[in-house]
Amino acid sequence: MSSNLNVNTGSNTTVSPGGLPSRRNTELAMLIFAVLIPVFAYANVGLAKEGELPAGMLGYGLGLGLLAGVGHLVVRRWAPYADPLMLPIATLLNGLGLVLIWRLDQEPSITTPELGGAMAPGQLMWSTLGVALFLGVLIFLKDHRVLQRFTYISMVVALVLLILPIFFPARNGARIWITLPGIGSLQPGEFAKIIIAIFFAGYLMVKRDALALASRRFMGLYLPRGRDLGPILAIWGLSLMILVFETDLGTSLLFFGLFVIMLYVATERTSWVVFGLLLSSAGAVAVASTTSHVEDRVNNWLDPLAHASNDGVTETAQAMFSFGSGGMLGSGLGQGLSRLIGGIAPKSDYILATVGEELGLAGLMAILVLYGLLVERGMRTALAARDPFGKLLAVGLSGAFALQVFVVAGGVTGLIPLTGMTMPFLAQGGSSVIANWALIAILLRISDTARRPAPAPAPSPDAEMTQVVRP
Amino acid sequence: MNKPLRRVAIFCGLLVLALLVRVNWVQFVQADELANHEDNRRVKIDRYAQPRGNILTSDGKSITGSKETGGTDFKYKRTFKDGKLWAPVTGYASQAFGASQLEKLYDGILTGDDDRLFFNRTIDMLTGKPQKGGNVVTTLNSKAQKAAFEGLGDKKGAVAAIDPQTGAVLALATTPSYDPSSFAGSSDEDAEAWAALQKKENPDEPMLNRALRQTYPPGSTYKLVTAAAALESGDYSLDGKTDSPDPYQLPQTTGDPLGNDGNHPGCKDGSIRVALQWSCNTVFAKISDDLGNEKMQEMSQKFGYGEDKLDIPVRAAESVYPEDNRPQNAMAGIGQASNRATPLQVAMFASAIANDGKLMKPYMVDKLVAPNLNVVEQTNPEEMGQPVSPENAQKLQEAMETVVEKGTGKTAQIPNVKVGGKTGTAQHGENNSKNPYAWFVSYAKGEDGSSPVAVAVVIESSSTARDEIAGSKLAAPVAKGVMEAILEEKK
């Protein structure tokens, strides 16, 4: 991945022999950038829109700096060997997300009381809660292997979280929300993503040998035994159920992809990937041909500029116009017209359209590369982890993150049909930002364990008894 | 577990790579297409982000304007001064419904986006000034335009006036008209005003530019072309008797013979001068038949017929003299049957004759002016052709002047001014069932003998009883008003 980094750490091996520098100072230096860049972006919006520095700039900068600072100190104290890149990247993305949402709050047409008014203050609060959860995980989760104990509890919790939204009304055609009176609405799918990764990691760690070895050969593929197949078919069924009842293409794709990836890593068998892809495409085709919601999305994808049924311009088309109008360098923060997408979509699902229009191709690519970097740091953590559970959990979490980024960004830019998910850290949405901070915390915990110098081997009781006979 | 892990890491990298390729495709390869797509509201928002340049009359008066709206998307809105009067010239520029005619053709100049204004734009950008649009200076004469529009009044019709020596359009009026200001914005009221002007709601089609875009049977005004063809053939002279019976039995027919309105005795064997003076159908139908379809078509084309890309710069509809059988060709020779011409085309008859046979290409935009008053583009008069020789043109002038002095066109007489004209009453509808079209085409001569104005007037229908309808009564006074306005200016 990064040869630079390897040179700096002085090691090419993924499993560290110990005695590595902690890299905390690197993290601190990058965190300073990660705070300064959004603060400058904030100033930029103010100067572009009003011609003066925005009033809240100092408070915002201090707030973001404080969150990053506390995060850094906690990592320094409780996870000193953790990966130095993940916290700065997450902080930068979260900070830019806040600026973008605040910038869109400046557009009166999409910040009416009916649409929920200004959203940046709420998002800042959710981000604070997210960082608090991040700190909590780092402080109280001393070792990620503790999570292994909760394998089956995780399964139950994940199932409950996934099924809950069915009982709540649909929004924008997708049933992915639960509404708690007094608190607001939550997207349980975001949390389920982490919890289900814990379940898969625990389950697969136990079953991997059975799945990998006890299989029959059929047409060149190793087919699993029926009893091993059970849970897989259950997950497949569940994904389809989510798709049908919650009309949430993104989440089901995410879970199925997550399971295929983890299964493949656990068993090292390509046949599982083939098997998984066959199942998922069969399900997708079956559902797409029966659900009108999915059909609409696919039609929008095939012809993004087509007019809506009332001859209006669709959100999809508006987003494409945003990207196109941004061009190479963009219009500059605060000077784009992504508000034309309408509603709250520019702040949530379509936040990348604002990035594309105002920061241009250059800015959008930078953001995508940041996501890529975060994902690959997670993958590296999985490679470096010393225990199978840690490996599986890390690859699951970063794989899920990667899939989510791909599904959302691909959907918004018209690479694949659009699905209702949010861009991690960037988009407006409390559940998403909280869950993703927790995800980063777990990855940091795994990487800390992986890079921590191995404790000096305990004196073995056998040592005394074994005598070396020298000639 | 590390081997599949590495593969998964590569797979995730490929996902991000796919996204990067996609955003390059959208924001680089497709960027221009998307940025300028017709559904992309940014195009309109940019168009109305600064005051639009103006459209001016020949004497430099602006007939358009811009005003601040205070709206969220569109900062400025197009306004039209005396919109109904000038709508056939300017067209419209609406936030909701796009633009037409000059507003559309010169959008780049008016918004300042035109490539030729690049230098201006760059200077403005460097000095921090907002972008400014340029102006479009037309050839139209405000007094003539006013005379034309007011002359038509509440009747349905059109006027086209051109300067025979240059082809510059002096007046271009049509009634009923519309006020483009009424739907220049994007509110619900604008949408209602727009809907009310559409053909579906309004059978009078106020948004139809009759002077340029509507073709009519030219009726007796076409006899000028038939006369020109006769003289050019060399077989006829201005005052020589023609061998034509009255009434005239159309060739290859057995039905009622063709007669003359008013049954003037001079029509039998009448000379071309007399036949024009009393608008004898019999004489010209026979001439048309004697010359034949091919020659008639040829002469029509020399006068501008069959030109489907006549851009002045707004495109005029094509006037048609069809290929036809003998009786139809005879009728087409008196401006009936399938003979169709725009009012502009009819004005071009008089224009060519008044300019001693030389037809100038009509144009209505004099120059395009940059915001710093530099001329970006200047239109130079252009010759379209020479349909008749100068001698024959002068003979036709004599005949047309006879029409006004002592023929059917007396109502167009102006004291102390030499006016030549021709009336027309074109039949319309099955068996002449609808009100006929009243035509008058004329030119006026200045003191030096050259003509500064040729004008054609058509009035489609009127509440006047049908036997009274004649170009002379309805159309000639309108033409007279336009000619007077121009002559006044020349003094």
Image: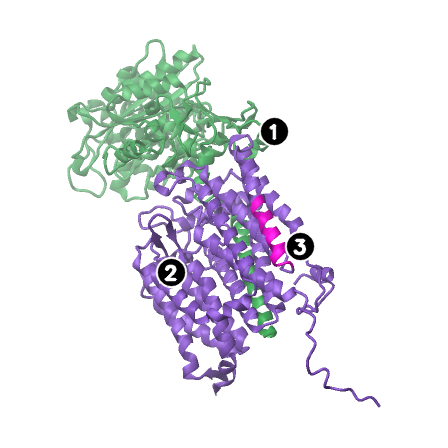
Chain colours: A purple, B green
Chain under numbered label 2: A
Mark 3: amino acid: Arg
The residue that appears at 41% across and 24% down in the rendered structure is B67
Q: In which quarter of the view is residue B275 placed? A: top left
**What span is in magenta?**
A66-80
Using the image, name the chain to which the residue with label 3 belongs. A
Residue A70 falls within the magenta-colored stretch = yes
Disc 1 on helix, strand or loop? helix
Mark 2 surroundings within 10 Å by alpha-carbon count, few (fewer than 14), some (14 through 19), many (20 or more): many
For residue B123, which numbered disc appears in the image?
1
Q: Nearer the viewer, mark 2 or mark 3?
A: 3
Q: Tell me if residue A450 comes above or below residue A464 in the rendering.
A: above
Name of the residue lying farthest toward the bottom? A471
The disc labelled 2 sits on which kind of residue? Asp
Mark sitting on residue A24: 3
Amino acid type indicated by mark 1: Ile
Instruction: Residue B206: give x, y in percent of width and height.
Output: 28, 31
